Image (cartoon, coloured by chain):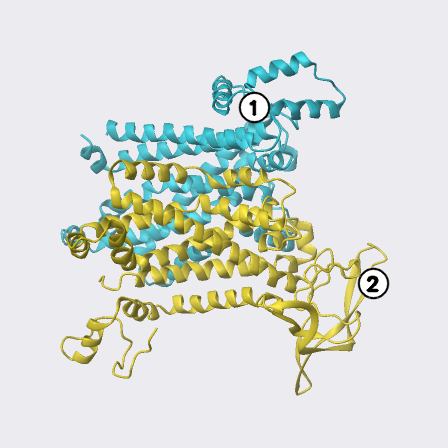
């Protein structure tokens, strides 16, 4: 079991490394280096960067040195929590991102939980009552969920919210709570606004999970041990929930790892449509303004966050599935 | 594919009842693999319908300029945000399609332009009407379009309304279809090359190469792709031409889209490496390349086609999403994403809901490709079950 988790952790480390290289590449891609654009930015604001200060910045970021040295220097700064300055906001990147990263995590986790809460019972129902009306409805909604890109879904929802209720369904907070400091009331306000974005983000995943659950459970239900359990007089509910559902749950858990990157990806673009205060709109703005330290840092954070989530789901899988535990002993 | 002769009275494809129809059975035994796949595919009604839909969409791609009746980039401030005009097919009892004329005026209270249909003016719609010049299928110079209206500039037809700049949404949709669907096709081709080469290497050689490629795939799959695409797309120089951006976007979306294809190819290679016919090919002295391309690849071609079909919708959505964000194709290029960009604002959409119409083909095409891919995947292994 330890060996398994160890292997996953090692892969996670590699993934984080790959993400850091890619983020660095994003920072590096636009023409010109950081210091020249910084000086230009400052000049347009009316302040002058002294030659000495420019020189210090160049040394700090290793500009002019080979690219891998620049990368290492950047990593060194990142590790101690210095992500550079956001050029557009003229504040440290960490300050600009602040709360938004937390809200991104909250939205992603909420939609993951919603995916499970919806997919589990619906999947079980679809399998146990195969070819019933409910099964067909679930399958149909599932296909819609898979086929409609979530930003279009968000757009359509916004439209109907506007037409039917004349209300803006987007956002994560009520207007009066927007800039309030964190409190129980604000958290409750957030909880009230979460379901719609979570549903939009989670629908595709839910659809997929329902199909997986249904298929797995159908396979399990045909196995002899189910007949045995039934013939021993267990109640139908117990027969289904105690054995086959537990078996069918394994592949279900292992797909979290693939669902999470998808949800995080989706949250970026859905946030833009729904106006959620996550890192999504910030990333788009940073990219358009070529505010590369901000953009690179956001990509890095999102990637690392996803890797941690995936690792947690691996641990969860080991906990659910004893076969993995035994295999590695 | 060949049509089924009359010997088979019922839909073929599954093993028939024992002994009763030996002729059918014999036919199945001698049928080629592709024939078996076709018979099995044909039974999947939804997939067949989806195939027709997909073919229809690609016909639109080929004949976009014929189906469009207005120059997609011709803007006219006087016709900004006109609602769709209703097409009347019958004038009395006679088949003579026409639309009503339109009167545009300023609302004195809000200063917005409002348009009212004017039933006293009937604008006849003609088939094969002359219009702007184009090259049919890129070869034959033509001026005729499927429909059009005669007469001066006051007589117009806008089946799906106009956008903010007074451009015809229907014509733009036709051109957008062309770009959105071909970008998916190119992207998937690139992904396919990457997937087959890397998946093939991985599955055929195994060992260290396999481990490296598999770990790379796992890493790529655990990275959230949209932020990454956005980063790469935003780094494209602003002064690139439409064509350069088009190819750059294609490469960006295919670079991250090959993993699933590689996984399928590797799986087939692993399954097939130990098959008798592969071992015999090697024993009679076939070179490695010949073994792979003459003996192995044809036998899992069908799987590759199925996986490719399933990969296409993701590509189309990617392009639409990137362009929707303003990071993909940029005007004057027209794609579904570019068209949907105008529908980003709720207020605009509430006043002019027809700007959301380009979402409809996206959803239809993505669904059709998914069903078609499902059907192909089920049919890809005609010997199974």
Q: Is residue B191 left or right of residue B111?
A: left
Report whether residue A316 is seen: yes
Quarter placement of the N terminus of chain B: bottom left
Q: Are marks 2 and 1 in contact (CB under 8 Å)?
A: no
Is A234 situated above or below A180? below
What colour denotes chain A? cyan
Estimate the x, y position of residue B156 in percent, counting from the top left: 74, 70
In which quarter of the view is residue A59 placed? Answer: top right
What colour denotes chain B? yellow
Q: Residue at x 66, y 11 (%)?
A: A52
Q: Which mark is residue A24?
A: none
Estimate the x, y position of residue A322 in percent, counting from the top left: 22, 36
Q: Which mark is residue A94?
A: 1
At numbered mark 1, what does the secondary structure look like: helix, strand or loop? helix
Is A112 situated above or below B54? above
Q: Residue at x 46, y 38 (%)?
A: B224
Estimate the x, y position of residue B227 in percent, counting from the top left: 52, 38
* Front in this rendered view, residue B334 or A224: B334
Q: Residue at x 48, y 20 (%)?
A: A69
In which quarter of the view is residue A98 placed? Answer: top right
Foreground disc of the pair 2, 1 = 1
Quarter placement of the C terminus of chain B: bottom left
From the image, tell me which residue sits under label 2: B105
Q: Residue furthest right?
A: B108
Q: Is residue A112 left or right of residue A221?
A: right
């Amino acid at each position: 079991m330890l060996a398994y988790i160890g292997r996953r952790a090692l892969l996670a480390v590699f993934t984080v490394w790959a993400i850091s290289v890619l983020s660095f590449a994003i920072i590096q891609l636009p023409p010109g280096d950081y210091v020249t654009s910084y000086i230009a930015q400052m000049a347009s604001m009316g302040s002058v960067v002294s030659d000495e200060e420019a020189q210090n910045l160049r040394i700090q970021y290793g500009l002019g040195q080979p690219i891998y040295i620049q990368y290492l220097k950047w990593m060194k700064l990142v590790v101690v929590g210095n992500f550079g300055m956001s050029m557009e906001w003229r504040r440290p990147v960490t300050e600009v991102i602040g709360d938004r990263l937390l809200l991104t995590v909250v939205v992603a986790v909420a939609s993951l939980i919603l995916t499970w809460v919806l997919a589990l019972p619906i999947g079980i129902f679809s399998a146990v009552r195969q070819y019933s009306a409910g099964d067909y409805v679930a399958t149909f909604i599932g296909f819609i969920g898979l086929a409609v890109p979530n930003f279009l879904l968000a757009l359509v929802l916004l439209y109907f919210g506007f037409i039917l209720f004349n209300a803006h369904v987007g956002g994560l907070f009520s207007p009066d709570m927007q800039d309030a400091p964190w409190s129980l009331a604000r958290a409750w306000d957030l909880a009230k606004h979460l379901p719609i974005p979570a549903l939009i983000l989670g629908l595709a995943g839910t659809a997929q999970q329902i199909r997986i659950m249904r298929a797995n459970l159908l396979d399990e239900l045909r196995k002899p041990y189910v007949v045995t359990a039934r013939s021993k007089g267990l109640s139908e509910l117990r027969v289904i929930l105690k054995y086959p559902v537990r078996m069918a749950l394994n592949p279900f858990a292992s797909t979290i790892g693939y669902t999470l990157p998808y949800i995080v990806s989706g949250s970026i673009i859905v946030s833009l449509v729904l106006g959620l205060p996550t890192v999504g709109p910030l990333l788009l703005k940073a990219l358009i303004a070529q505010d590369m330290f901000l953009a690179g840092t956001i990509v890095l954070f999102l990637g690392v966050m996803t890797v941690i989530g995936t690792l947690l789901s691996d641990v969860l899988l080991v906990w659910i599935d004893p076969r993995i535990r035994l295999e590695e002993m | 594919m060949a049509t089924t002769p009359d010997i088979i009275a019922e839909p073929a494809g599954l093993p028939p009842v024992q002994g009763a129809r030996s002729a059918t059975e014999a036919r199945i035994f001698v049928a080629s693999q592709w024939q078996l796949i076709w018979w099995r595919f044909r039974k999947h009604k939804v997939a067949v319908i989806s195939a027709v839909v997909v073919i229809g969409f690609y016909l639109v791609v080929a004949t976009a300029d014929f189906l469009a009746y207005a120059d997609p980039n011709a803007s006219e401030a006087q016709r900004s945000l006109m609602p769709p005009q209703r097409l009347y097919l019958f004038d009395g009892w006679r088949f003579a399609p026409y639309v009503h004329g339109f009167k545009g005026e300023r609302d004195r209270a809000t200063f917005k332009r409002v348009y009212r249909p004017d039933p006293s003016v009937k604008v006849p719609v003609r088939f094969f009407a002359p219009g702007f010049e184009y090259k049919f299928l890129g070869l034959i110079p033509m001026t005729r379009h499927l429909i059009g209206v005669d007469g001066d500039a006051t007589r117009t037809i806008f089946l799906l309304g106009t956008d903010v700049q007074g451009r015809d949404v229907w014509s733009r949709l036709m051109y957008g279809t062309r770009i959105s669907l071909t970008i998916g096709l190119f992207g998937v081709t690139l992904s396919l090359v990457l997937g087959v080469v890397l998946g093939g290497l991985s599955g055929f050689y195994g060992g260290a190469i396999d481990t490296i490629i598999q770990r790379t795939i796992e890493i790529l799959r655990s990275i959230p792709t949209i932020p990454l695409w956005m980063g790469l797309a935003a780094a494209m120089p602003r002064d690139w031409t439409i064509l350069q951006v088009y190819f750059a976007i294609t490469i960006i979306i295919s670079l991250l889209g090959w993993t699933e294809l590689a996984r399928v190819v590797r799986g087939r290679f692993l399954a097939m490496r130990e098959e008798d016919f592969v071992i015999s090919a090697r024993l009679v002295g076939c070179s490695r390349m010949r073994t792979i391309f003459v003996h192995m690849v044809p036998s899992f071609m069908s799987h590759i086609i199925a996986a490719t079909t399933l990969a296409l919708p993701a590509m189309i959505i990617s392009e639409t999403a990137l362009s929707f964000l303003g990071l993909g194709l940029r005007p004057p290029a027209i794609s579904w994403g570019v068209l949907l960009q105008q529908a980003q604002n709720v207020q605009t959409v509430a006043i002019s809901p027809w700007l959301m119409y380009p979402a409809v083909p996206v959803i239809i095409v993505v669904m059709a490709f998914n069903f078609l891919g499902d059907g192909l995947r089920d049919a890809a292994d005609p010997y199974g079950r």
